[in-house]
Structure formats: structure tokens, C-alpha cells
């Protein structure tokens, strides 16, 4: 496994690499990331994993500086997983003029759901992923459904800007008790970790109710919100949206996603479940 | 020479095309465009010319609908010039969802110079060129210095978004009397055509004065503006800027560009001259 730190060396490697599957990450890798890598390996070509904590997608007061950086452990996991190249640029490689002047601007969805609570986050994500795509020039790129809104923003960007890349959605990895795997779970105290699966349980309850025919979306999401708040969570949102474009769900929609974001102590946790109705 | 109208066919052709030089145009080709094509051919690989009148870069009240479309004549010129592929998508190919939701957003320079008079123009240019780059995947792309601000926006975008493309600036083609070649010259009446070189003569006078040591930028540009207005022009701007980043020129700057835009009757003409001081 090669570790490449500069754009020029990555481009040189790319010239003869053939089919490339790409997994962009911010490091601090868990089994969710390794599921993305496995999906990438299954494509049969070379696998590039980027590790870059992107300042552009963190807002004021967010955890950019304290975001867990575990490069050596990450590389050990990636080598064991059969990755060909770890692309690990420093901030000056990706932002040599400090200010990123040209940005990829997503549409209004960037200001809803998580975007409402993280202004500029999805602009930062779209821009850095666009840069990484232009550097790695992958044939396909893996994105977890855990970050569902991010997946939709990237898919939309690729389609709308005609990027020659297949976006591959990968199911969310979960602990045995249902908690979605996330680097930010590391911020949880022991007590919070025991409480954390309540988020998934509430999403599952909404999914079950939808499948049983319930269509009072407000009642469903308010019930979940109340349950979380009663157990010490500060809820950013619980919402039911159309799965394709994340529009507000209507009673006749068949392909939905239930999404939630809430803080438990310090960390902000997000999760979602797709729901397909017959 | 192949004429390709769909993204999928262009992508299929691209797979085995090797080195590709790209000339994006809006058609209505003149010798200025053919100079771009000659530069592209000199690269030794294949040459793709796109012809697409991009609605996204025209504003309200601009000439999108009446912009001259001369596809057959254009193709004859391009075939004679040794072009390999003309990419000629219709609007539904590039904007299948009608609305282009994801855009490439240039920095504040987009609202100065021509951008001040054409709101959204450079966003539209950056976005469509980004799309065309993702479709054609050229190794290099030719842009005329005639549209100097456009050239700088594209160069900035390519650098900032790490696009794997060499941007090649090509000198402005001119008529014998100095008038910069432009599709919009076709809108000029006979009398206006005789008057039109005054724009170039004023830029040349400013260049000569700068080379002679004059540094009163305001006096230089106001003199040119007055001369144009005295001869029936409606002047949008005459400005002296730094050639690299189009910042307002300072007395110590060595690498400058003098830019102007003005209306003569119906058409709006633009031109510029680079000035390098010792």
C-alpha cells in the first residue's frame, strides 16, 4: 500500500492505474468505512482512500481542531483491507492559496436538515469532493448512507455537473444495539453510549408505523422528538422526506427516508432509515 | 470530422481518443476561433470543438435568442481546419432537468468589470465550462484573451478546483484596423463598423502612455471614456487592472491589462490589451 501526500504524485500514479474506486474519508476509520472499502475492492480495480479533515466543511464552533486524527491506526486498517493508495494531503496541498475562491454551490437543500444547523457545510463538502474527484479521477466513488443528505448532495452534483463518476451508496454500518457507526461516537461517555441507540429505535418505530399505514408525519416525528427530549437529547430535527430529492414527504410518496439529528451531551449524532412502501 | 450530439457518444469516443485539445465555442465562428483551433491542432493530439449557445450565461434582455447560429458554415470551417470532433449538444443534453441546480461559484471578481453589467454571467460560464470539461475530459483547453475576464475566471476555477486541464490563453484576433474579432461585430451597421476601431485605438493610447511612464490611471481611463462618449458610445467601463488577478492596478504594478466594454448602437463590444512594464 502506497501513502501519497501530494497532488502531483497522485496524478502520476493515476496515469497507469486503470479502473479506480475511491473512498473519501476524514480518517478515524471504523467498520462503516471498511464496508465502503470492501465495496470499492469488489469493483476489481485499484482502491484509493483519501484521509483529509476538510476545514471548509466545519463551521464556527464545530470540532475541526479536535476531530480525531488517527492516521497510523487508519493506515494499518486500510493495508489489511487491501487498499492500494492512501491519499493523505495536508491542508496546504488542497488549499494552497488559503482561501478557496471557487466553490461548488449546491441548491436550496443545502440549507435544510443538517444544513440548517451547519451553515456552509454542504458547500464545503461539495467543493472538497469536487477537488478530490478532479485529483483522483476515479471511475466510481463510495458514500455511506449514514450521511444521507451528503450522499444526495454528491449524487446531485455529479449528475448536474456531468462528472464522469459512478456514485455508489453503501448501507450504514451499525453496532449490535443499532447505533450507527460514526467517528463522533468516540466523544460519548459510557452513559451516553448506552443511551445513544434511542435515536435508531425512534427511527425504527417511525419506519414500522409508516409500513403499518400511518401517514400522520407530524405526529410520528413529534412523538420521536418528545421521546428523545424526555431522555436528555437536544433535537435538531426529526423529519420524513422523499428519498430521491429529500423533499417534504407527501402522503402518496412510496420511497421515503426518515432522518434525525440530535445532541447527546457533547456530540451531535445523525442517523436515518429508508422506507419503501408498497 | 465527426459531429457528436450526445454526452454518451462523446464519452464513448473519448475512451480511445488519447490526448485531446478542446476549444469551447458558441459557434458563429470567425478567424479568432480558428486561431484557437490552430493552437489546439499544434498540440498534436485530437481536437474537439464544442458549439453550444449556453442559456445560463445570458441575462434578462440579452441576446440569447438572437445570438447568431450558423452551424453548417461553422462545420465547414472546422472540417477545413482539421478538427476531429464537433460536439454539438442541444439544451436538453446539458440541462435535462431544465434548472441547473449545482453551480460553480466564482469569487467576487465575477461581479466586477463585465460582471457588473451582466449579473450571473460568469457563474453561468464557469458552470457550463465545468460541465463541458467533465464531458470532454480534455488535456488542454484554449481560451481567447479577447474575453480576458472569462479567461481569468476559467484559469482560476481550474487551479482552485484542481481540474486536470491545462488552460491555454490565445491572443486576440483583430481586423486590419484593429477591431477585435467577435461574433457580435455582425450586429454593427456599416457606419458603426467604421467607428468601432476607436475602442482599440483608445486602449492602444492608454498602453502607449503607460509604457511612456504615465501612472495617473484615472486620467488615462477618463480620457478614453470621454473620447468614446463624444463619438456616440455608451461606455460600461474602461479600467486598468493587474493582469494576474484583475485587481485594481497600483502604480508599482508591472503586469497590467487595460480593459473596456462599450455599446455602439445595439451591440456591446469588449476589448483589452496587456501591458508589461519594465
Image (cartoon, coloured by chain):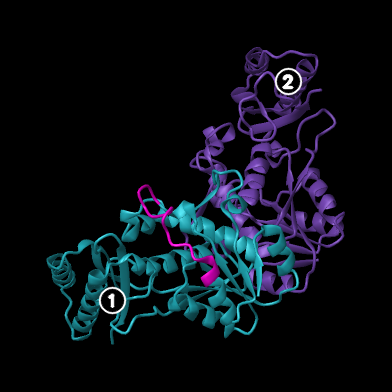
Chain colours: A cyan, B purple
What is the x, y in percent for residue B9? 67, 73
* Secondary structure type for disc 1: loop
Residue A204 shows up from this direction = yes
The image quadrant of residue B8 is bottom right
Position of residue B169 relative to residue B163, above or below, is above
* Secondary structure type for disc 2: helix
Q: Nearer the viewer, residue A78 or A261?
A: A78
In this rendering, position of residue A248 left or right of residue A221: right
Q: Pointer 1 indicates a residue of which chain?
A: A
Q: Say whether marks 2 and 1 touch (CB < 8 Å).
A: no
In this rendering, position of residue A261 left or right of residue B36: left
The mark found on residue A253 in the picture is 1
What is the x, y in percent for residue B265? 62, 28
Q: Which residue is mark 2?
A: B202
Instruction: Point out the frontmost of discs 2 and 1.
Output: 1
Name the residue rendered at 73%, 23% in the picture: B203
Position of residue A98 relative to residue A271, above or below, is above
What is the x, y in percent for residue A238? 23, 67
Q: Nearer the viewer, residue A112 or B113?
A: A112
Name the residue rendered at 76%, 34% in the picture: B180
The mark found on residue B55 in the picture is none
Q: Nearer the viewer, residue B151 or B249?
A: B249
Residue B164 shows up from this direction = no
Q: Is residue B186 magenta?
A: no
Location of the C terminus of chain B by quadrant is: top right
Q: Is residue A63 magenta?
A: yes
Give the dominant element type of the magenta stretch: helix, strand or loop: loop
In this rendering, position of residue B15 left or right of residue A267: right
Q: Pointer 2 indicates a residue of which chain?
A: B
Residue range in magenta is: A59-73
> Total label count?
2
Between marks 2 and 1, how big is the CA–CA gap? 64 Å
Amino acid at each position: 500500500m502506497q501513502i501519497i501526500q501530494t497532488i502531483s504524485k497522485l496524478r502520476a500514479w493515476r496515469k497507469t492505474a486503470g479502473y479506480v474506486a475511491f473512498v473519501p474519508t476524514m480518517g478515524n476509520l471504523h467498520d462503516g468505512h471498511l464496508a465502503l472499502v470492501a465495496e470499492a475492492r469488489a469493483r476489481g480495480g485499484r482502491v484509493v482512500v483519501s484521509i483529509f479533515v476538510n476545514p471548509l466543511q466545519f463551521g464556527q464552533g464545530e470540532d475541526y481542531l479536535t476531530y480525531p486524527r488517527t492516521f497510523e491506526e487508519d493506515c494499518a486498517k486500510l493495508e489489511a483491507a487491501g487498499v492500494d493508495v492512501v491519499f493523505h494531503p495536508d491542508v496546504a496541498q488542497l488549499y494552497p492559496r488559503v482561501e478557496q475562491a471557487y466553490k461548488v454551490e449546491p441548491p436550496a437543500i443545502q440549507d435544510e436538515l443538517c444544513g440548517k444547523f451547519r451553515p456552509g457545510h454542504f458547500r464545503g463538502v461539495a467543493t472538497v469532493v469536487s477537488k478530490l474527484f478532479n485529483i483522483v479521477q476515479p471511475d466510481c466513488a463510495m458514500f455511506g448512507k449514514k450521511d444521507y443528505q451528503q450522499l444526495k448532495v454528491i449524487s446531485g452534483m455529479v449528475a448536474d455537473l456531468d462528472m464522469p463518476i459512478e456514485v455508489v451508496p453503501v448501507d450504514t454500518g451499525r453496532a449490535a444495539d443499532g447505533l450507527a457507526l460514526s467517528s463522533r461516537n468516540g466523544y460519548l461517555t459510557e452513559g451516553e453510549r448506552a443511551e445513544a441507540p434511542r435515536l435508531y429505535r425512534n427511527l425504527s418505530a417511525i419506519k414500522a408505523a409508516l409500513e403499518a399505514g400511518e401517514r400522520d408525519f407530524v405526529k410520528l416525528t413529534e412523538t420521536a422528538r418528545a421521546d428523545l427530549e424526555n431522555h436528555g437529547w437536544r433535537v435538531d430535527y426529526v423529519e420524513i422526506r422523499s428519498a430521491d430529492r429529500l423533499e417534504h414527504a407527501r402522503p402518496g410518496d412510496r420511497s421515503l427516508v426518515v432522518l434525525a439529528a440530535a445532541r447527546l451531551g457533547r456530540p451531535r449524532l445523525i442517523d436515518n432509515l429508508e422506507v419503501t412502501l408498497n
